[in-house]
Amino acid sequence: MDGLPFFLFSIIPIKPFAWACGALWLAVGAAGARSLISRHPSLVLSPDGIEVAGLTIPWSEVTGARTLKQNNVAIDVVDADALLQRHGPLRRLAARINLRTSGTPIVLSSNESGVDQDRLLQTLRLRLLPPPD
C-alpha cells in the first residue's frame, strides 16, 4: 500500500473505532430484541396511573392529553422536570428531546398500545375527567 490512503490508515486508529461501533450495534440490537421478546406491554393504563417505559406516572400528575402528528399522543404533566429526574440517563435524554419538541416529556405512539390514536386519546380523556357528583 502506498500513498495517502496508507498514511491515513496508519495514523487513524481504525480497530478501536470498529470495536466501539460493533459494541454499540450489539447493544442497540440487544435492547431492540429485549423489547420485542418482552411479554410486558410497553403501555399500561392502570388505576394507579400510566405505566410507560418502566415508569408509573400517577393520574394526579397528569393534566391532559393531546394529539400530535404521526399517530402520537402527548401526555401533559404537572411538573416535567420532576418527571425527568425519575428517568434513567438514556430515557432522560429522550424525554428531554420530547419536552423540547412537543412541550411534554411523555409522548406515546398509538402503535405501543395496539389501538388507534383516537381510541387511545378518548380513553385517556375519559380517565382524566373529574368523577361525577
Image (cartoon, rainbow, N blue to C red):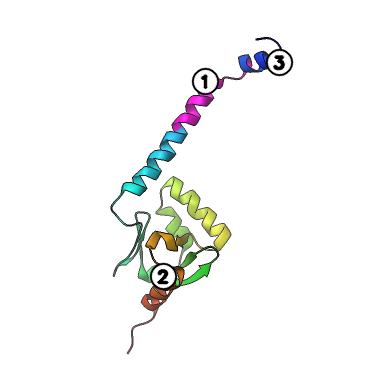
Q: Quadrant of the C terminus?
A: bottom left
Query: Contact (CB < 8 A) between labels 3 and 2?
Result: no
Tag of residue 4: 3
In the image, what residue occupies the spot 43% across and 59% down? 83
Residue 13 forms part of the magenta stretch = yes
The residue carrying pointer 2 sits among few (fewer than 14), some (14 to 19) or many (20 or more) residues within 10 Å by Cα, namely many
Where 1 falls versus 71 (above or below)?
Answer: above
- Total numbered labels placed on residues in the image: 3
The disc placed on residue 15 is 1
Q: Quadrant of residue 14?
A: top right
In the picture, residue 82 is in which quadrant?
bottom left
Vertical arrangement, residue 111 with respect to residue 125, above or below: above
The N terminus: image quadrant: top right
Q: Which residues are magenta?
A: 11-23
Report x, y in % for residue 113.
Answer: 38, 62
User: Which one is earlier in the sequence, the residue at label 1 or at label 3?
Assistant: 3
Instruction: Tell me the kind of residue under disc 1.
Output: Lys
Q: Which residue is mark 2?
A: 120
Query: Circle 1 — which element?
Result: helix
95 displayed left or right of 128: right
Direction from residue 22 to residue 133 in the image, left or right: left
Q: Helix, strand, or loop for circle 3?
A: helix
Residue 65: where, in percent of width, then height? 46, 71
Classified by dominant secondary structure, the portion drawn in magenta counts as helix
Q: Earlier in the sequence, mark 1 or mark 2?
A: 1
**Crowding at label 3, few (<14), some or many (≥20) Cα neighbours within 10 Å?**
few
* Residue farthest toward the top in the current orientation of the protein: 2
Give how far apart the Cα atoms at labels 1 and 3 are: 19 Å
29 within the magenta span: no
Q: Tell me the SS state at disc 2.
A: helix
Residue at image x 52%, y 57%?
98
